[in-house]
Structures are given as C-alpha cells and as structure tokens.
Amino acid sequence: MSFIRIAHRFLASQKWVTALLVASFSGSSLLLVAVNQTVESIDRAFSDRVSSTPLIIGRRGSRFDLVLHSIYFRNPASQSIPYGELQIAAAADSGLCVPLLFTHETSIHHSPIIATTDAYFIARKLAVAIGSMPKRLGQCVIGASVSDTSNIQIGDFLQPQPKSAFDVTSPVPIELEVVGILNRTNGPDDMAVITNLETGWILTGTGHGHISGDDGTRTNNTDGDSHIPETPITRITDENINSFHFHGDEKEYPLSAILIFPKDLQAQTVLEGKYLDDNNPLQAIIPEHVIQEVLESVYRVESILSVVSILSLAFVVLMLVVLTVLSIRLRKQEIETLHMIGCNRSTTIKLVGCETTLILLYSVITMAVGY
C-alpha cells in the first residue's frame, strides 16, 4: 500500500504531466470505442427498419431519398405517384400493399404527418397505448415521442405546417384531432403523426369541404366540378364532415410511395421487373440494398478512423514509455538516495510500475466517466 501512496503523491506533484498522459490515453481509447459504437448503432438503426420493408415503389430519382422519406420520414416527397399504381399492385395479388402520403409536417417539432391505411399498422405491428385508431376524416394518432416532447394529449388538435409560407395557392391545412397515442417502437413511428389517407388528400387539396351556403369559386369555367371553397374549413366537425368531397379521377390522387410486402419471392421478382425500364417514371427498389451501399461507405470511414485511433493510442503508449525513461533519468539523484537508505533495485522498479499503473487506472476512470 505504501508503494501506491508514494506513487500517487509523486504523480500529484507532477499534475500537468499526469493530466496530459491521462487525457491523451483516455481520449484515444474513447475515440476508438466511440467510432465502433457509432457505426454499430448506425448499422442497427438502418438495418432493423429496412430489413422489414422488402420493396418500395416511388418516383424515379434518388433511391436514397426515396428510402429516407418513405421509411424514416425525412424530408417530404417533392414528387408524387398516382394512386392507380397501388390499385394495380393490389389487383395483382402481389402481397400487402401500403400507400404512404407524406407532404406535411406539424408546426410543433416538425413531426412528419403520414397519411396511410390500416395496412400500415398491420405491416409495422403498431398498436395504440391509449385511445383509438383514426376512424374518420381529420383524426390522427401520434407516436410516443411526440406525446412526450409536446405534452399533446387525446382530444387536442395539431396544426399542420403549410408547405410554403409564400405559396398563397396552397389550401389552408385542416387541424388534426388526436384520438390515440401509439405504443413506443424506438423507431421513426415514435416521432410521427399518422392519419388516414383521405385526410392526407384533404391536406394536399385533392378534397375539401364547404361551409353551408358556400358553393365555392370555380377555377375552370368548363368544369363545373372544379372549384375551391371561398371560406376554407380549418377543423372537421360533425356539422361539416358531410360537406367534404374529392375531385378528379381517384387513380390520379397523389401518393408519396407504396410499401410492398410481397407474399413470396416470385411476386417480388415480378414487381421489380415491371419497373426496370429507365423510361418508366416510377422505380421499385429494395431498401436493404440501398442502405447497404450507404453502410459500405460508413464502414470505409470507420476503418480510417479506427486506424487513426490505434495510431494515436500507440503514440500515447510510446510517449508514456519515453516519459517514464526520462523521468527515471531526471530522478537519478532521487533513486540514488532511495538506494542509500536501503531500497534495492526491485523496489525502484515497483515504484515506477505503480506510477504507470496509476496513470492507466486514472485513464480508465476518465474513460468510464466520459463514456
């Protein structure tokens, strides 16, 4: 115990050198651990979600962007695909077909508003912890994190954020009534607001309602069905819900993407082949393949950072050895004094060993606190 006490007091007398060694050793080690854990968490976060989504149909363009906004709800889709594509896929009995419409976010925390059908809840195995699922126009359920961070409860209303504050032609978004809070999934659904597909179409302006006595203003004199309300409705109630209706061909109603859960490999292969033509404005992608390409780049960066971390750690160890040797030379008179009072060579080695051990111990403690 006396060796440790003496070594500790010596290191305390050389506090700046000791602090430098501890910071260098623990910092290099933490960097190596942090890089590995960050890559593992990225891999886990991406892989778990995409592995449960076999196929996505969306507008041709960036495959990564399509995965981001249809699986992780990042950045609303700038282009839409027709609802008719969903009808075709469903008619072919390819498997479970899930429509997604993501064009708006809430004004609170910019939570994505996802319009879909009951098939989404089945595919993602989602259930409400409190309340119920949306049953009519204007209703929604919120993710567990949305409820936690905003204190929104059942019966409250959410205000969708307009697509652009400068686009005066966009319809005034209706408020969404919260009727349920989803169970926590530790995924993107926790930060989402989910409503039915018809409500999503109302948000995009495909459908609207009228206040009693407001027949609307025609936007096309040759089309009696083409009009917009002079007084927009901002909240759906029992009194005005029957006035809501849609215009145009249902096949052309907008979707952001379609998630396909094929019943077998053959059905998936047939669907993929349908969208191989580059002239087709739509594409079918396997999100797992897209994310794997991204992760390969991440792995390359990880390899570089790991090499840098190992080299840094090796440099710190070398510096520790050099400083120990220099310390012994600078403490030559001190060591000779120890020998004169009866300390043998092994005692000196034990003292130096205790000092090195304490530096490593302090570094481990620093790493534990920093981690």
Image (cartoon, rainbow, N blue to C red):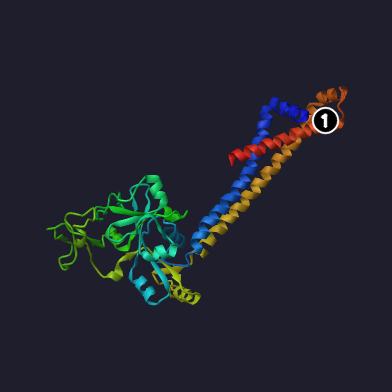
| Residue 148 to residue 69: above or below | above
One can see residue 323 in this view: no
- Say which quadrant the C terminus sits in: top right
Residue 307: % across, % down: 65, 49
From this viewpoint, which residue is outermost toward the front?
130
Identify the image quadrant of residue 243. Answer: bottom left
Residue 34: % across, % down: 59, 46
| Residue 366 to residue 145: above or below | above
Residue 40: % across, % down: 57, 53
Q: Nearer the viewer, residue 307 or 262?
A: 262
- 323 relative to 180 in the view: left or right: right
Identify the image quadrant of residue 74. Answer: bottom left
| Residue 77 to residue 35: above or below | below
- 118 relative to 296 in the view: left or right: left
Residue lying at 43% horizontally and 65% vertically, measured from the top left: 123
| Residue 112 to residue 334: above or below | below
Crowding near pointer 1: few (<14 within 10 Å), some, many (20+)? some
One can see residue 39 in this view: yes
Residue lying at 42% horizontally and 70% vertically, measured from the top left: 96
Identify the image quadrant of residue 138. Answer: bottom left
Q: Which residue type carries mark 1?
A: Thr
Residue with the mark numbered 1: 348
Residue lying at 64% horizontally and 37% vertically, measured from the top left: 365
- 240 relative to 335 in the view: left or right: left
Residue lying at 62% horizontally and 47% vertically, measured from the top left: 33
Q: Nearer the viewer, residue 264 or 19?
A: 264
Q: Secondary structure at mark 1?
A: helix
- Say which quadrant the N terminus sits in: top right
Q: Nearer the viewer, residue 205 or 189?
A: 189
Residue 44: % across, % down: 54, 56
